[in-house]
Image (cartoon, rainbow, N blue to C red):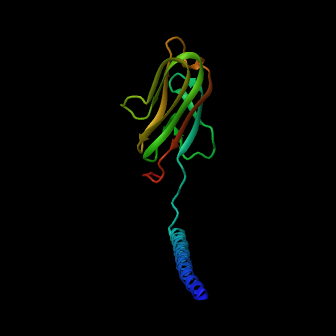
């Protein structure tokens, strides 16, 4: 009798074990299926993106220096990098792409000056600082096609030619690639 009871006890215990084993196999099968689905999705997306033509992803930027000043033109901007995507014309940086731009302006001057940074004619200046020998300015602003970034300087006591600048630098970096560009 006891032998029969042991067999009944083993049969009941084995059925629970099989149920647990079947559940684990089902979970493993579901995980493998999801993994396969993710792999197929990745392959399809990779195949689709390889067929989409690549757009120009050059970021519009310029690093311009200003180390000298002329009375009629103010500070003379010159490009410090050969591979810039923006140009300096008539002492201004012309904006070709709509979007947000990071602008950094810094420099150390031999005399106290009044420095103003403009980006549109007949608009309020982007930056204006009175009686300064040091400028360190960073901002992000939305600009549009044909905006022009330029500097103006005045000094009550000295002519522009007599002002020396150390580390004068104007940096513009387009922050929203993919927006409207003229070129």
| Extreme residue in the top direction | 157
Q: Position of residue 104 (x, y in %)?
A: 53, 34
Q: Does residue 94 appear in this view? A: no
Relative to 110, does residue 169 appear above or below in the rendering? below
Total marks in image: 0
| Extreme residue in the front direction | 1
Relative to 139, does residue 130 appear above or below in the rendering? above
Comparing 167 with 31, the one in front is 31
Q: Position of residue 167 (x, y in %)?
A: 63, 28
Comparing 136 with 111, the one in front is 136
Picture quarter with the N terminus: bottom right
- Residue at coordinates 60% horizontally, 33% vertically from top-left? 65
Q: Position of residue 67 (x, y in %)?
A: 61, 27
Relative to 86, does residue 111 appear above or below in the rendering? above
Q: Does residue 8 appear in this view? A: yes
Q: Position of residue 173 (x, y in %)?
A: 53, 42
- Residue at coordinates 40% horizontally, 35% vertically from top-left? 120
- Residue at coordinates 52% horizontally, 76% vertically from top-left? 23
The quarter holding residue 63 reads top right
| Extreme residue in the left direction | 122
Left or right of residue 125, residue 171 in this image:
right
Comparing 92 with 84, the one in front is 84
């Amino acid at each position: 009798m006891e032998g029969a009871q042991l067999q009944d006890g083993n049969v009941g215990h084995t059925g629970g074990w099989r149920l647990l084993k079947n559940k684990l196999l089902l979970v493993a099968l579901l995980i493998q299926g999801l993994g396969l689905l993710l792999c197929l999705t990745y392959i399809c997306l990779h195949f689709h993106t390889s067929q989409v033509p690549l757009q120009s992803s050059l970021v519009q930027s310029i690093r311009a220096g200003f180390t000298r000043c002329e009375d009629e033109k103010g500070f003379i901007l010159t490009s410090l990098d050969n591979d810039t995507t923006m140009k300096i014309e008539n002492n201004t940086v012309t904006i070709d792409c709509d979007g947000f731009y990071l602008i950094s302006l810094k420099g150390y001057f031999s005399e106290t000056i009044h420095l103003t940074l403009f980006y549109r004619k007949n608009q309020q200046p982007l930056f204006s600082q009175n009686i300064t020998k040091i400028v360190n300015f960073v901002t992000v602003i939305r600009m549009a096609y044909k905006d022009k970034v330029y500097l103006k300087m005045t000094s009550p006591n000295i002519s522009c030619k007599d002002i020396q600048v150390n580390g004068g630098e104007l940096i513009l970096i387009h922050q929203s690639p993919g927006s409207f560009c003229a070129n």
